[in-house]
Image (tube, rainbow, N blue to C red):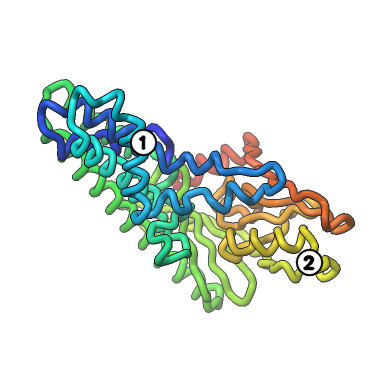
Amino acid sequence: MDIVTHALLGAVAAQSISQRQHARAASGVGAIAALLPDLDVLIRSADDVLMTLTYHRHFSHSLFFAPIGALLASLFLWFVFRRYMNKRQLYLYALIGYVSACLLDVCTSYGTHLLWPLMDKPISLSIIAVVDPLFSLILIGALGSAIYTHQQRWCWLGLVGAVVYLSVGAVQHQRAYHTAEALAAQRGVTPSRIIIKPTLANLFLWRAITIEDGRAWTDAIRVCWSSEAKIYQGTSVTLIEPAFWKDLPPDSRAYRDLTRFFALADRMLVTHPQHENFVGDLRYAMLPDSVEPMWGIRIDPMNPDASTDFVVDRSFTPKMREALIKMLQGK
């Protein structure tokens, strides 16, 4: 989730359990602690472009690491907030803020290692986009009202509102999933997997990826309460594995990076239709029905031990913008 929403949720959650005299200070502690898990983006290497991708939302987002993360936050914040509360209270507010960030990120589409080290596979509920202004507004309203009125109940109402909003996202996710199942049956496809991802800033338009025997269909599905689901059928593409490049030596850097990226992308690799030797993660695209991945790696088969490039393609043409608006409007 975006850092503003993380800070808001951390502040609301911490103030909801605080003593009245600590309310504002608790919000500050919770807000700052909620930002700490995403410091994992600083883990990077000039020689390894996949390192950041490997450790983003990894151990720092684990519930088992949260007590350590909260302790680090407490040590950092003690000199600022020691006149407002004791160490135990500071740690409690930091822990609540830190955990709130871990739980919120697992609701998004990227996935977090929430149960690491017990489970090394990322968990992703995919019920809300990484940016959702309406969700943020719920928290802004709750926090602002609590600070203005000095009444803690606004924070509780804000948390209830957040849970209700996420629950609506879960229901919409399931509706989109069932629609994708029905579409697969119409195509005569027996899917081994169906992946549903939210699109930016709404709970109506979803990206559906249906997989059967190494082939994936991408579609946009709009689910609205007042009407039946509307489907915008995309196209299909062949999923690839590192062995797709038969001439790459297995001990080459390119092959090793392809193998790592294959695992990081949850086996959802495709070649980009417009960029040579660009291998991307099909789960994410600028348009919900597109087979053009938003990011990936570029390799050089002629020089397999050369450095691998990580490429982000966020090009968004006026034509694409028009298509997305029509989907959101149900046209």
Closer mark to the observer between disc 2 and disc 1:
2
> What is the secondary structure assignment of the residue under circle 1?
helix
Q: Is residue 135 above or below residue 235?
A: above
Closer to us: 288 or 306 = 306
Left or right, residue 63 beside residue 124: left
The residue sitting at 63% across, 40% down in the picture is 314
- In this rendering, the count of numbered labels is 2
Residue 145 shows up from this direction? no
- The three-letter code of the residue at mark 2 reads Asp
- The three-letter code of the residue at mark 1 reads Thr
Of the 4 image quadrants, the one containing the N terminus is top left
Marks 2 and 1, how far apart at CA: 43 Å
Closer to us: 144 or 175 = 144
Closer to us: 20 or 205 = 20
Q: Position of residue 299 (x, y in %)?
A: 78, 54
Question: Which residue position holds label 2?
Answer: 251
The residue sitting at 60% across, 64% down in the picture is 263
Q: Is residue 266 above or below residue 58?
A: below
Left or right, residue 89 beside residue 178: left
Q: Which mark is residue 5?
A: 1
Q: Which mark is residue 285?
A: none
Q: Position of residue 35 (x, y in %)?
A: 39, 37
**Which quadrant would residue 312 be assigned to in this image?**
top right
> What is the secondary structure assignment of the residue under circle 2?
loop
